[in-house]
Amino acid sequence: MDSTDRYTVADIGLSEAGRLKVEWARSRMPALASLRAKAEIERPLEGQRIAGCLHVTKETAVLIETLVTAGAEVSWSGCNPLSTQDEVAAWLASEGYSIHAWYGQDNSGFYECIDRTLEFEPTLTLDDGADLIYRVHSQFTDLAEGIIGGTEETTTGVHRLRAMADAGELLYPVIAVNDAETKWDFDNVHGTGQSTIDGILRATSVLLAGKNFVIAGYGHCGKGLAMRARGMGANVIITEIDPIPALKALMDGFRVMKMDEAASMGDLFCTATGMKDVIVGRHYDSMKDGAIICNTGHYDCEISISDLEERADEIFTIRDNNEAFVLSDGRRIHLLARGRLVNLAAAEGHPSEVMDMSFANQFLALCRLAREGPDYDNTVYDIHPDQDRQLAELKLSSSGITIDELTEDQKAYLLDFSAGT
């Protein structure tokens, strides 16, 4: 471990490998590049101190660059013990950024790193899962008075924060970046869908074609994963607790059933719900020999690892991020990435092109808070629809794509309620 007052990283010597990865990401994030060029002149975050708790990836490094270019001071930690790319953390440290993160943290190390980011008394926070925000609310409440507002990147975190707001316990306003259409319909669907498959294949090299692939949850993430699993020849089964997404899954051509029924049928299982105890002991009892289990939701509580450990006579590592649990009857169940986000723990997370939009939303939301936050109530706010449209137009433009526009006559037609057959 390499550590100073400014950074704590696994190995500062990895910085050159990190530089190359960041250059790759930077070249594939044109929307954020466009905003950065404008921000370099206008400096909309001048004087702000931003504490970030978000996966330390090559794409996150580009976001950090953008925030600093816009005038902010930044201190960063990872939001998951197994998602930090150590070479990227090393590059950030070598470039003078305040960064405290490494791959393979234990629980105490994880929270220690978050606490280090709060030492410079931030005026804005950026979160993925709301662990930093909750840390402020539970351990450092004195800092809340100086925080203008925060942003939240994930469905799980937004649920936590809305519950805090409903209970009257949220101490500063937060913008739900996750709920932007240009985030969840792209990052969650296309990013999670592709990167989860990537993580599974890196950890197993298993053939998906012909396999029964059980996906728990048919929200945006589950939907994207189901789409790609089917595209690779898997027979996809969806489990749900909500009748509306269950019906959507059925109409999209997938089999829908309870996990109790799917447990004996699945070859691969992936949870994408944000809920605890989705796969538990009774499910392991009926699984096939060789079943593979993983999670692509934010927390590792979706899979009951303790139930699996209790049933295992032997546990050993097959390959990186692939543990075999040998049960008393000889069956083997394979757990990937210790139940953490398989797309980040076993792969590199979402592709840069889709994170371009999510992080552009983060940047714009922080600029909005710096500008308007002092006037906001302590609740959770949505992204403005105009920001969604602006960002979609920017992303299309950066890809060289133009679309049609309504004529004046067509605009008038939209408002003409007398027009009929």
Image (cartoon, grey):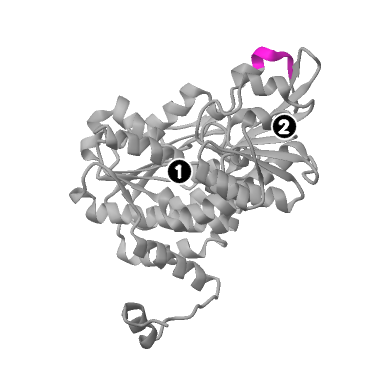
Q: Residues within 10 Å of mark 2 (few under 14, many from 20)?
A: many
Residue 210 versus residue 282 in the image, above or below: below
The amino acid marked with disc number 2 is Ile
- Name the one closer to the observer, 3 or 169: 169
Among the 4 quarters of the image, the one containing residue 313: top right
Q: Residues within 10 Å of mark 1 (few under 14, many from 20)?
A: many
Across and down, in percent, residue 282 comes to 65, 20
Identify the residue at horizontal 70%, vertical 48% (top origin): 229
Across and down, in percent, residue 371 comes to 24, 56
User: Can residue 100 be seen?
Assistant: yes
Q: Residue furthest front?
A: 421
Identify the residue at horizontal 52%, vertical 36% (top origin): 241
- Region in magenta: 309-315
Q: Which residue is mark 1?
A: 154
User: Residue 312: within the magenta?
Assistant: yes
The amino acid marked with disc number 1 is Thr
Number of marks? 2
- Name the one closer to the observer, 366 or 187: 187
Q: Which residue is mark 2?
A: 292
Residue 391 versus residue 334 in the image, above or below: below
